[in-house]
Image (cartoon, coloured by chain):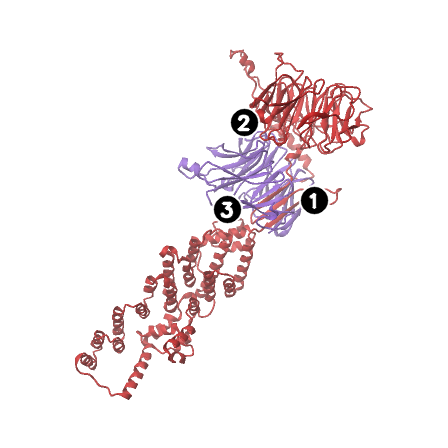
Amino acid sequence: MVEEGTRSEKMEDMYRRASSCSGWIKLPSTHCAASFSYNFKMRVKEIDRTANVAWSPESKYPIYVATGTAAQQLDATFSTSSAIELYSLNLDEATLDMPVVASVTSDFRFHKIVWGKMKDSESGCIIGGSEKGTIHIYSADKMLAKSPDCLVAELTRHVGAVKALDLNPFQSNLLASGAGDSEIYIWDLLKTDNPMTPGQKSQPPEELACVAWNRQVQHILGSTFGSRSVVWDLRKNEPIIKISDSMSRIKAKLLAWHPEVATQLCLSSEDDHTPVIQVWDLRYATSPLKVLESHRKGVLSMAWCQRDPDLLLSCGKDSRILCWNPNSNVPNGEVVYELNTNNQWCFDIQWCPRNPSIMSSASFDGHVTLYSLMGGGHPIQPSNKVAESFGGAPIGTAPVQVPYEEEKVLPLQKPPKWIRKPVGASFSFGGKLVTFGLEKSPNPQQPPARVVRVSQVVTETDLVIRSNALEQALSGGQFAEFCAMKAANSGSDALQENIWNFMRVNFENEPRMKFLQLLGYDQNELARKVVEYTGTEVAASSSKGVDAQELAQKMSLLNTGSIMKADRLTASGQASPNVGSKTPETLDNLPDGSSAFDEIAGSQSGLSGAQTPLVIPTDNADGLMTQALLTGNFEAAVEMCLSEDKMAEAILLAIAGGPELLIRTQKKYFQKNKSTLGRLISSVVTHDWAHIVEYCDLDNWKEALAVVLTYALPEEFSALCDTLANRLESERDGELSLNASLCYVCSGNVEKLVQNWIKNTEDSTQPLALQDLVEKVMVLRKAVELSRGQAPAVSGGALADKLSQYAGLLAAQGSLSTALTYLSNASDVSSLSPLFK
Amino acid sequence: MVSVINSVDTAHEDMIHDAQLDYYGTKLATCSSDRSIKLFDVSNGQQTLITHLWGHEGPVWQLTWAHPMFGNMLASCGYDRKVIIWKETNGTWGKLYEYAHHDSSVNSVSFAPHEYGLVLACGSSDGSISIISSTGDGSWDTKKISNAHTIGCNAVSWAPATAPNALYDQQNGQQQVVKRLVSGGCDFLVKIWIEDNGQWIEEQKLEGHSDWVRDVAWAPSIGLAKSVIASCSQDCRVIIWSNDGMSAQWDRKTLNKFDDVVWHVSWSTTGNILAVSGGDNKVTLWKESLEGQWVCISEVNKGQGQIGDRPNSG
């Protein structure tokens, strides 16, 4: 813990330790503790030319450097050849070399070159001011294309060497040029035949050293002559101010405008007696605002960084390259940086417009060097030219490679503006977004508030709303209402409506009967139809009408007799585990099967007995049967009836002959009767529900489900539903697969429901689709829990997968506590681990 | 819907450069040009200053939280060329380790997925990337990628530990943990680095930006074989790079060209939403549509915004 109060002591202590243990860290001799020198690789690229330099415009990518052979410089060969060359800034190659991509020879050497963008030209044009008073304009596109006619224009108005050139930053076709005899021309590069001059020639005639357009106001141009500096207003075509310092007459060579403040500029002096840079504000033009004094000899070049007005480079005849903060109030100027220059004069220095950390310097020793302000250059390989010139011959016992002195530079104390990140937005767990940015202070006197905001991002608004509704229903126990709401809102999707209705029924009384209704088997409706069809009042005599189920129950009792009554209660009474209690009162009111038939038989016998005497036949088939009956041989009698195709008699006799005989007789009957209805009756009577679900035509899946709902025993109910569902899923290429979900809802098979859903859902990772599933799953689990006393466990598998996916979705929307409830059974999701703190 | 749940006045004395919530979203760390780091308790809507950390001698650029299995731990980097790892012990925060072997501003720090142990990557203006690992006995092991990006590395981001590494597996025929990270720099490049036999080597060089790459972010794995990286740049563009996990090919898709420099990109933890913050103070949220198009779903202003398919068509 470092408290603020003890901070400086700690820092000092740290420096002591750092300096004592790390050999490469040297404590600075003059500056504050923060800026010690260290290995700072600044040199990035090098070109072996004595040349003036122009960077490609900011809009141009990739970046190039144009060089124009410098006038009035000679190397040891006294060569006077001249060329404009283009080099590519190949930063991705870890070498000091830059490849020449274009080269055009010229008849003259250059004092100044500039590179500007041009309308309808990708790379713009390169303009050189020559020693012979001409201005050469080259098309950069043509140069890069290695086209022979890249010199597109040659302007020949000037007298004397053209040393001053500048392109207007607002209108790139406006070129200002200056040469001897106080001549300034403003050229329209699109129409170069008639340049304008800004007012009267300044007297006495002097050579123009520099022209510079204002960075904020496009019609203001600055210029320096040998002894004075003049600012022109081109709208009025006249000089508006002459800058002269009554106190110390400097010989201004260069003028640089402030990148952001329209009225401020710097003037540099080449005079060794006054090697200073003056900062002027034209609003107070009687004396400079400040004077930057550190150069020991005249200043040769100066460049103000367009990306950070706190950085001004200058180089001079004292072989130093300095970087100033011209806005600092430190007396005599604040040098924020000094570059190592190997003791060579630099005559030109420039910032790279596109890559602000890079600057170029041109020196009299024949090099154009590119530096990186922030370091990160390449390790400098010592030159082995000396060794090469000796042809590799041994030149003594000393190592050929002299240890190269690493550049030791002070870093910029304040980071340049372009690396100070002003904004940020970072996500963190649970859809939280942390944002900060520059905020304007309501009161300019006050510093702006430094606020960081934590926001909740909810992209799945519908999901969150629906999740909340679900959680409310689950915690409030309003399951039936929830299902009803879902069914009502399922729109035109009949299946969804059905599923939700099925779900709802699970929470109501007599669910199985209601399942049947939902499948379209309404008991009252059926009763009405039966009446219509038969025209009897039999059905109407029962207040409830003839219930399909009741009917079936009666049928099912046929083979059992009253002794089976207890079984029968369970058989169709509590049909399925999730279906709650059945209709006991209906069952209690049921006459048992045999007595029903007794009644029928009784009434028949009563009728016949009353009206016709009973004649007992004694011969032929009837006779045989009679004998059998008289001897109590029901078996034989039934056989006789069957062979005579007297089915009703056979069944009646079989009832009298006992359950075993009845079952056998039924079987024989069904063997004979192969009709569809017969098969159904067969299944109903023999309790062979499996037969129905396994063999029914799938178009009749609803009927099959109805049968199962009506008759199946609780222990077989689920399995039967699942079997039917299975068939729906697997047969006919899954055409009816969707309907299987209804069966799973009936059987309460949550896992299977999930699998069915995955199979039938196109994009099962879509949030709302997943919400759909989870709603069903959670409600169904509740239903099962209600009927069985405990919810089915989630043990891995598709359900667990989907639940953890769902939890992930919820967590990402910030619903952390809800998400956690879905994870209790699926905890191996590392991305959600922040939930388990 | 983007709604502010907490607004913290940090009272930093200069520009804020980074703000990060911890793993559980209960602690907020901020750092600033005022050379300090502040920690706030932001649980349950509060904004209580926990501690004010001093130790950097220049602007502090970036912060990264370690996985809580290593305790409460935070790393910071700054213009003073230092990386500092801070740790809470017995309720007090202090320096655990200081790394000072970069030659220029350290612009980015990022803790590796916890599966790799306590490992930190740092990107510096000196062009190099350091990978600092705790050996477990209190000392730290360092590897350095020199000249990773000429004239400076601006951002580093780790591939998720579950990232597919099909290429590597095919060569070796076995499942191995392959560590990868992505970096962006002043050479306009995005580079992918892979650890091979303890050495970090360049695996991919992704060219597409035409100015400084300001930030890179490797998307969290969402269980698919695909790898996705977002990069943003001074050239005002955000590029989404994707690899299908089968080939060495990285597809490039420009998410958008903005009106200003894009400084920062950040993926949601589920990996499907990208937050983009730019020099015009604008924060936008982006999502890939089913057709594979990137759509702006929200513009966030002072922490607030609507969610829609394309607000203001911006």
| Label placed on residue A93 | 2
Q: Which chain is red?
A: A
**Same chain for the residues under marks 2 and 1 in the image:** yes
Could you give the CA–CA distance between mark 1 and mark 3, rounded to whole angstroms? 42 Å
Q: Nearer the viewer, mark 1 or mark 3?
A: 3
Could you give the CA–CA distance between mark 2 and mark 3, rounded to whole angstroms? 38 Å
**Mark 1 surroundings within 10 Å by alpha-carbon count, few (fewer than 14), some (14 through 19), many (20 or more):** some
| SS category of the residue bearing label 2 | loop
Question: What residue lies at 81% left-to-right and 25% top-to-bottom?
Answer: A245
Q: Is residue A278 left or right of residue A627?
A: right
Question: What residue lies at 33% left-to-right and 73% top-to-bottom?
Answer: A555
**Picture quadrant of residue A102:** top right
In this picture, is B153 found above or below B313? Answer: above
Q: Amino acid at mark 1?
A: Ala
**Picture quadrant of residue B215:** top right
Q: Amino acid at mark 3?
A: Glu
Q: Which chain is purple?
A: B
- Chain under disc 2: A
Q: Amino acid at mark 2?
A: Glu
| Label placed on residue B291 | 3
The quadrant of the rendering that contains the N terminus of chain A is: top right
Tell me residue B310's x, y (percent).
58, 48
Could you give the CA–CA distance between mark 2 and mark 1, rounded to whole angstroms? 44 Å
Foreground residue, B204 or A641? A641
| Residue carrying label 1 | A449
In this picture, is A432 found above or below A323? Answer: below
Tell me residue A742's x, y (percent).
42, 61
What is the tally of numbered marks visible in this picture? 3
